[in-house]
Amino acid sequence: MNTNELNPVVNVGTEKNPLMVLCATTMMMMFEEATGKRYDPDTMDGYLNYCDGYRDGYNENFDGIKLTKITN
């Protein structure tokens, strides 16, 4: 599979109220291909850092709706 062709950014909102999110399954596949590590609880910090980096890179290169980090 060529993960360069996958788009993990998904609009789960409406045209009036868009909500852009990252698809966790796609991000796991991209993480595994980019790092060579399997996704599991032992690599969770690396996975979250990878997702944060992807989000930041997406936001820097996109003029539309930005992705934000959800915290508890």
Image (cartoon, rainbow, N blue to C red):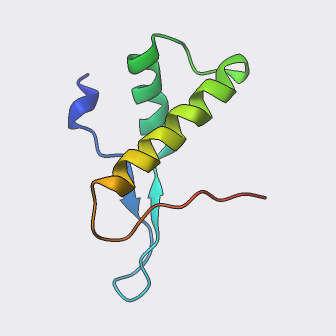
Q: Is residue 38 left or right of residue 4?
A: right
Looking at the image, which residue is at 65% across and 20% down? 43
| Left or right of 47 on screen, residue 33 | left
Residue sitting nearer the eye, 45 or 12: 45
Residue at far right of view: 72
Q: Position of residue 33 (x, y in %)?
A: 39, 18
Quadrant (top left/top right/bottom left/bottom right) for the N terminus: top left
Residue farthest toward the bottom in the current orientation of the protein: 16
The residue under the point 41% across, 37% down is 26
| Rendering quarter of residue 5 | top left
In the displayed structure, would residue 11 be above or below residue 8? Answer: below
Q: Position of residue 28 (x, y in %)?
A: 49, 30
Q: Residue at x 45, y 15 (%)?
A: 35
**Left-right relation of 7 to 66:** left
Residue 70 % position (x, y)? 65, 59
Q: Is residue 31 left or right of residue 62?
A: right
Above or below, comparing residue 17 to residue 33 in the picture:
below
